[in-house]
Amino acid sequence: MSDNKLLGIGLVGTVIAALCCFTPVLVVLLGAVGLSAMLGWLDYVLLPALGLFLLLTLYALWRRSRRMKGTS
């Protein structure tokens, strides 16, 4: 997978997970469609997802910087 694609996936996933963790976006959406019973499980899913996407972003940045050092 290319560095740009890996970085893009990491950043987009991090932003989406952060929006859902720190704002009531997902709570409002699930309540609007009648799935409010799933709200108790959000922390068990979103916080690990946020951590995973942050690690993916950091890995992509580390990989990109390592390749930049190798080409110069």
Image: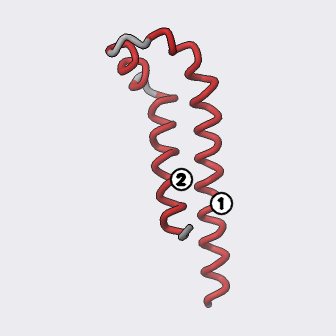
Residue of label 2: 10
Answer few, some or many: residues within 10 Å of disc 2's Cα (few below 14, many 20 plus, some between 14 and 19).
Answer: many
Colour setup of the view: secondary structure
Numbered marks: total: 2
Spot occupied by residue 13 in the image (x, y as percentages of width and height): 50, 45
User: Which mark sits nearer the N-terminus, 2 or 1?
Assistant: 2
Residues at badges 2 and 1 in contact (C-beta under 8 Å)?
A: yes
Residue at horizontal 58%, vertical 39%? 50
Residue 26, which numbered label? none
Residue at horizontal 39%, vertical 25%? 25
Rendered position, 19 above or below 29: below
Rendered position, 66 above or below 16: below
Quarter of the image with the C terminus is: bottom right
Answer few, some or many: residues within 10 Å of disc 1's Cα (few below 14, many 20 plus, some between 14 and 19).
Answer: some
Residue 34 falls in image quadrant: top left
Amino acid type shown at disc 2: Gly
Residue of label 1: 59
Spot occupied by residue 26 in the image (x, y as percentages of width and height): 42, 24
SS at mark 1? helix
Amino acid type shown at disc 1: Tyr
